[in-house]
Image (spheres, rainbow, N blue to C red):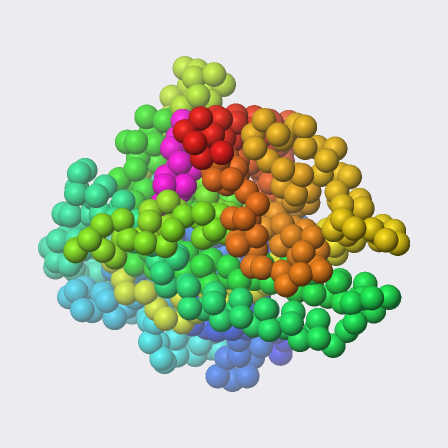
Amino acid sequence: MNELAPAQRDLRIALVGNPNCGKTALFNALTGSRQHVANYPGVTVERKEGDLSTPEGRKVCLVDLPGTYSLRARSPDEVVTRDMVLGTQAGVEPPDLLVCVADATNLRLGLRLVLELKRTGRPLLLALNMADIARHRGIEIDTDLLAEALGLPVVTSVAVRRGGTAALLAELDRMARLPAAAPPAGGWTPPDAAGLRALQREADRILAAAVHAPDRRDAVTRRLDAVLLHPVAGLVVLLAVLFLMFQAVFAWAQPAMDLIDAGFQALGAAVGGLLPEEGALGLLRSFLQDGLIAGVGSVLVFLPQILVLFLFILLLEDFGYMARAAFLMDRIMGGAGLHGRAFIPLLSSFACAIPGIMATRVIDSRRDRLATILVAPLMTCSARIPVYTLIIGAFIPDRPVGTGAWGWVGLQGLVMFGLYAAGIASALAMSFAFKRLLWRGQPTEPFMLELPDYKWPRPLNLALGLWQRAKAFLRRAGTIILAMMVVIWFLSSVPRPPEGATEPAIEYSLAYAIGHAVEPVLRPIGFNWQIGVALIPGMAAREVAVASLGTVYAVENAEEEAPKLGQALSEQWSLATALAFLAWYVFAPQCVATLGVIRRETGSRGWAWFTFGYMVTLAYAAAFVTFQVARALGAG
């Protein structure tokens, strides 16, 4: 057996396993809130690390590696896992021990990966996760026989129960006390197709000897899949889930939004009451009240809606529905020139295009991966929610679209659903066009996917996931958005109006000059100079446009009691302008970070510029058509 050196020092342990084996749940159970996220040096693959202590007091740094089925490493994620396993990842300390996590209810592919890992000569331990579910289904695993056949320690774990990791922690302490084994001579070579087949035959032989399972699928999984994987009923359920998600974004988040909005209103009023309106302190008052509080507050008020969206995505992932949704969408996406595996990256892009683009690394074909990267920014990310919610709340009445059983369906939520549907439709349409224009004649690779069993989501995993995303949003609000608000306030307040000026102060400012300089280009799509001012810093992040509008209108109405931003827009914009603004944001690539990730993932500035160019063209065309048609119908 491979063992660790005697450890009087901290241990570095890496978790490796197949996708959907419960590896991340085990990582969360072991580390709790003592974890952090970063990228591996030189690549945009996410690295999760956390700290824990063993029963004997050893300090452990635990690394959650990307899921993989093999060390052949056909995708960037798998390359990182392979290099970490072999200890060749540049700039990263190699692990002292590998813990291979396998799904105890479905060991076939997990055992093959264990045999591959064993050939590397690295210290190795097998953890059979979800052992409680396996026992419930009548699956009997002879862990002693399995350990003897594999030649390495085997323990069981239940990541979702208190004390379910005790055996694993005890085994880590035991292995740390034993002497190290010499590395194998000759090094490691990746297995070819014949080698993988031989390893799978060996895994099947061990499985037959050590595992006895009843000859039936889980009844609940079978009944649910009969509906959720049905070509018609399954799509109906998927659309219903998405529709409910967008309704919830408005309905569930509103009380928390009202509370945050009231807090910022009170804070702004308190600051305004402490400082005079004239002189140097008046300038400070304007900066604090109109710049920081009005600007940042207009974005932070949307945090509850973003968390509701993330809650749905995390629930679907933990429940095991994401893979089913990808299976259902494979035929539709294949017709549009996308690989079936593109569904999960595109669905992740609903939260943010950056992790969605990074998630394309699970697609083996470079052509399929590139096609997904190019259309991922068209999916309606959470940064668009502040824009959509602001305009919908200001111009779309809050009333139900029906009566009786349909009385719960709100018009605002229905419009939000339509905007998301427009993003999905445009992504499929552009993928179809790219397939015909850029990759004509190149077939899409077949889609193969192992469907995990259904599992109840664990509250701790949901809480940690929401907390990490809330921190990311707040960090964004405290850096990019805050910096942009300082710039916008400065442009809106400098120079100060001359003595005896009768017009609003902002009409003497740099922002007014910049807005009027770009207004001729934007006038055909119905945009005024205030929108022009907001769009420029909005390139840093989409939600900055909302904060910029909040600052501009707050400064413009500084002499009066400034109304809420939505009220100010409804008084100064036409409905045609509002609809054109929404159409612009369905397509606009206003996120520099996303373009940067496209450049890094594709290895080319050209593809980043191509994405920017085609999206700006679509945004302008969509806004132009929307504005002209709406105005012709009397909405302008």
Nearer to me, 163 or 55 = 163
Asked where in the image residue 442 lies, by quadrant, the reply is: top left
Residue at 49% x, 48% y: name it.
Answer: 391
In the image, taking residue 558 as reference, residue 10 lies left or right, namely left
Foreground residue among 603 and 253: 253
The answer to whether residue 106 of the structure is visible from this angle is: no
Query: Viewer-proximal residue, 357 or 430?
Result: 430
Magenta region, mostly helix, strand or loop?
helix
Q: Position of residue 369 (x, y in %)?
A: 47, 33
Whole-percent x, y for residue 48 in the image: 54, 60
| Vertical side of 452 occupied by 528: above or below | above
Question: What's the magenta region?
Answer: 417-431
Q: Is residue 581 visible?
A: yes
Quadrant of the rendering where the N terminus is positioned: bottom left
Place residue 245 in its image quadrant. bottom left
The residue depicted at 63 percent of the width and 31 percent of the height is 522
Up-down relation of residue 196 to residue 429 (above or below): below
The image shows residue 468 at horizontal and vertical percentages of: 52, 64
- Using residue 434 as the reference point, say whether residue 602 is left or right of it: right
The image shows a total of numbered marks equal to 0
Q: Is residue 608 magenta-colored?
A: no
Seen in the image, is 54 located left or right of residue 450? right
Q: x and y percent of residue 482 in the render?
A: 69, 58
Please, is residue 512 above or below residue 430 in the view?
below
Q: Is residue 302 above or below residue 383?
A: below
Q: Going 78% across and 39% down the picture, which residue do you hit?
A: 513
